[in-house]
Image (tube, coloured by chain):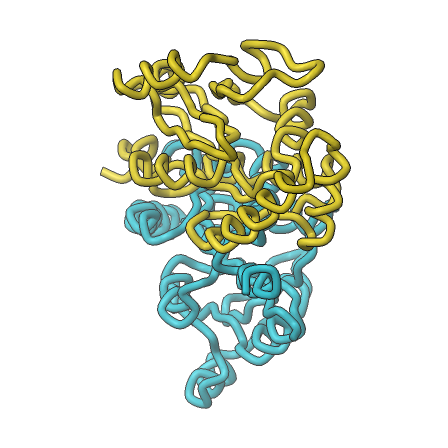
Chain colours: A yellow, B cyan
Amino acid sequence: MQERGLLIVFSGPSGVGKGTVRKEIFEGHGHDFDYSVSMTTRPQRPGEVDGVDYFFRTREEFEEMIKNGQMLEYAEYVGNYYGTPLTYVNETLDSGKDVFLEIEVQGALQVKEKVPDGVFIFLTPPDLDELRDRIVGRGTDSIDVIDQRMEKAREEIKLMSEYDYAVVNDEVSKAAERVKKIVEAEHFRVDRVIGKYRAMID
Amino acid sequence: MQERGLLIVFSGPSGVGKGTVRKEIFEGHGHDFDYSVSMTTRPQRPGEVDGVDYFFRTREEFEEMIKNGQMLEYAEYVGNYYGTPLTYVNETLDSGKDVFLEIEVQGALQVKEKVPDGVFIFLTPPDLDELRDRIVGRGTDSIDVIDQRMEKAREEIKLMSEYDYAVVNDEVSKAAERVKKIVEAEHFRVDRVIGKYRAMID
């Protein structure tokens, strides 16, 4: 029987660098999982590619998918929807491959309700001042949006305790290595692999 | 405040190659934990060094330590005692370092009762035929002892479900890498590290 893949849920406060760490993981070696591209209604930023960074959709299209039960999770965040289309995730897990979701904190908690045996990894900033510097440095947000993001981030960091693992983003390459090790180690958890050893045990 | 180290309990059936994998781990890089040398009453084998492979003690000395509460765990196995002296383990954990125990299955279950937040790793053979080949190949045991060990091993493999992780010993170097990754990943578990993030969270 084909063993089902692991659902890896990678999340953390806005501005912590989830996307950068995720890219580092997928550009490097030593991973064996598929990235589930998220869907969003936020405007495409310079350099972003539809279907690679996100699927960029209108509000109407996104709400239609929610209505049809086609989203594993979604969240509205600073006026835009972000979410994970369900079909790709299920088909990939069924094929035995791990699926990697990089999603917002609200969405991660929805996934946890639906898939409690997923691997929930929280990316955390070294401290709150550094998080603010990063959000400011990105230069895409107004002061008001920055303040909104910081307040939101504080709320989100409080939800760390709902996750399985916390990884600090002090250096992108180190954070990426930590995530890869966590995923590898999770593959050896007894409750995930005991089926393979049944023949020996019985 | 100094964070307490992790207690890593590495176990598995007799003959699976625990000692070989443990030596590979400690000879290589990428680990940062201390090995707790076990105590035994079994005869010293050629090449083994007292205080390195085991502390070799008489039955009387061992029973005196049990009586004085100086053992974290112990087991009697094929006519000999094996166990872990308590003082070294506690002092090392208190200093913030991880401690690595390579012990028998009976002993591991005793440790689990006393230290439930330890990391319990079970080393398993690829299959039972290969385990028998290894026990026979070691050439130190009579046929009767081999049969006893195989029967015991079957019983021990049934206890895999009491552990956190199962690592197959298909190749010593691969098994050692897996164990190191598991230990590294465990350091990122939210319930172990959340104290470090209290300042950000509160």
* Placement of the C terminus of chain B among the 4 image quadrants: bottom right
Can the viewer see residue B44 in this picture? no
Q: Position of residue A103 (x, y in %)?
A: 49, 32
Q: Does residue B103 lie above or below B1 as drawn?
A: above
Q: Position of residue A98 (x, y in %)?
A: 45, 24
In the drawing, does residue A51 fall left or right of residue B49? left
Can the viewer see residue A128 in this picture? yes
Name the quadrant containing residue A116. top left
Name the quadrant containing residue B44. bottom right
Q: Does residue A95 lie above or below B148 as drawn?
A: above
Q: Position of residue A166 (x, y in %)?
A: 55, 49
Q: Position of residue B87 (x, y in %)?
A: 58, 80
Q: Nearer the viewer, residue B130 or A70?
A: A70
Residue lying furthest left: A202
Residue at image position (39%, 17%) is A62
How many marks on residues? 0
Residue at image position (64%, 57%) is B46
* Placement of the N terminus of chain B among the 4 image quadrants: bottom right
Q: Nearer the viewer, residue A164 or A183?
A: A164
Q: Nearer the viewer, residue B43 or A54?
A: A54
Q: Does residue B152 lie above or below A51 as drawn?
A: below
